[in-house]
Image (cartoon, rainbow, N blue to C red):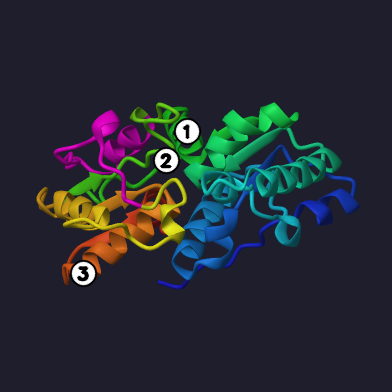
């Protein structure tokens, strides 16, 4: 199937023409630089275009939210990065932000208000589920009908922000075969990358967390591990490679599964 190309609108270009989009689509560091997660960004951008949503990205003006700096203990760097972004948002009159990264979602929603950055912050899972429930996003339920899928709860979506039902609602519409891991929802096991752990060496222990979590996913016998976070995707993909399962088990983001069902 030929990949359909789309034009992603950039905030500065729209403002130069006197246009103001309804949503800022926040791409995030992983979506901008990680080759695997760029595919997730493309999938979600195609869905936004398919729905005819008024949105734009910051493009070259987008910088890090400061979340990794704060988690690693560098409060001064975090505040510098956050205040710089808040000024960019003010310049473009941003009021609604859609994120595909739980870490960006959490910091915009729960921590930026302390610095004066108050916005309506929406996780892409909330956005997708709402459009599906309202009948605006009609999917092909046959594409994954006979494929078993398990879902890994990202810590910053689940435990930090209580987003448990939306991803499951989406996956149940996509497939009739959603199987839960032994530890799920608020009892889920972290992928091992959160809280700045992504950027440091593993500590002493018998087993790395991402390997244990991958084993829990494999124990479900699901053919697809659905994720909703760039850190989780990296860790579980590494886990599948470690277990030599990357050719038979797929790790796909929920946005990719939807785009696949829509043949976008």
**Where the N terminus falls, by quadrant?**
bottom left
Spatial separation of the CA atoms under disc 2 and disc 1:
16 Å
Q: Is residue 53 above or below residue 162?
A: below
* Marks 2 and 1, the one that precedes in the sequence: 1
Q: Mark 1 falls on what kind of element?
A: helix
Q: Which residues are magenta?
A: 166-192
Q: Mark 2 falls on what kind of element?
A: loop
Q: Residue furthest front?
A: 204
Q: Nearer the viewer, residue 185 or 180?
A: 185
* Marks 1 and 3, the one that precedes in the sequence: 1
Quick check: 118 left or right of 100?
Answer: right
Residue 141 lies, in percent from the top left, at 29, 44
Q: Are marks 2 and 1 in contact (CB under 8 Å)?
A: no
Residue found at x 30% / y 40%: 171
Nearer the observer, disc 2 or disc 1? 1
Residue found at x 77% / y 41%: 89
Quick check: 89 left or right of 48?
Answer: right
- Residue 221 is one of the magenta-drawn residues: no
Residue found at x 71% / y 48%: 81
Disc 2 residue crowd, few under 14, some 14–19, many 20+, Cα 10 Å? some
Residue 179 lies, in percent from the top left, at 16, 41
Nearer the observer, disc 1 or disc 3? 3
Q: Which mark is residue 242?
A: 3
**Which residue has dot 2 on it?**
138
Quick check: 183 left or right of 111?
Answer: left
Q: Is residue 218 above or below residue 23?
A: below
Quick check: 26 left or right of 224?
Answer: right
**Which residue has dot 1 on it?**
126
Residue 77 lies, in percent from the top left, at 68, 49
Q: Nearer the viewer, residue 54 or 214?
A: 214
Spatial separation of the CA atoms under disc 2 and disc 3:
37 Å
């Amino acid at each position: 199937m030929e990949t359909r190309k789309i034009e992603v609108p950039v905030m500065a270009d729209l403002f130069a023409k006197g246009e103001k989009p309804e949503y800022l689509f926040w791409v995030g560091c992983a979506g901008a630089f990680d080759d695997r997660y760029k595919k997730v960004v493309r999938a979600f951008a195609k869905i936004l275009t398919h729905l005819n949503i008024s949105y734009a990205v910051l493009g070259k003006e987008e910088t890090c939210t400061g979340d990794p700096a704060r988690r690693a203990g560098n409060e001064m760097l975090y505040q510098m990065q956050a205040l710089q972004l808040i000024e960019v948002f003010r310049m473009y009159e941003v009021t609604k932000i859609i994120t595909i990264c739980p870490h960006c979602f959490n910091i915009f929603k729960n921590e930026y208000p302390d610095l004066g950055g108050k916005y309506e912050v929406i996780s892409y899972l909330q956005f997708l589920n709402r459009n599906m429930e309202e009948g605006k996003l009609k999917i092909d339920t046959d594409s994954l009908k006979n494929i078993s899928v398990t879902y890994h709860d990202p810590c910053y979506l689940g435990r930090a922000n209580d987003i448990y039902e939306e991803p499951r609602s989406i996956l149940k519409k996509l497939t009739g075969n959603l199987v839960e891991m032994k530890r799920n929802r608020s009892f889920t096991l972290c992928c091992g990358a959160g809280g700045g752990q992504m950027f440091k060496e593993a500590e002493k222990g018998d087993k790395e967390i991402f390997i244990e979590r991958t084993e829990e996913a494999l124990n479900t016998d699901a053919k697809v591990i659905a994720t909703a976070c760039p850190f989780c995707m990296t860790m579980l993909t590494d886990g599948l490679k470690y277990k030599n399962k990357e050719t038979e088990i797929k790790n796909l983001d929920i946005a990719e599964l939807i785009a696949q069902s829509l043949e976008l």
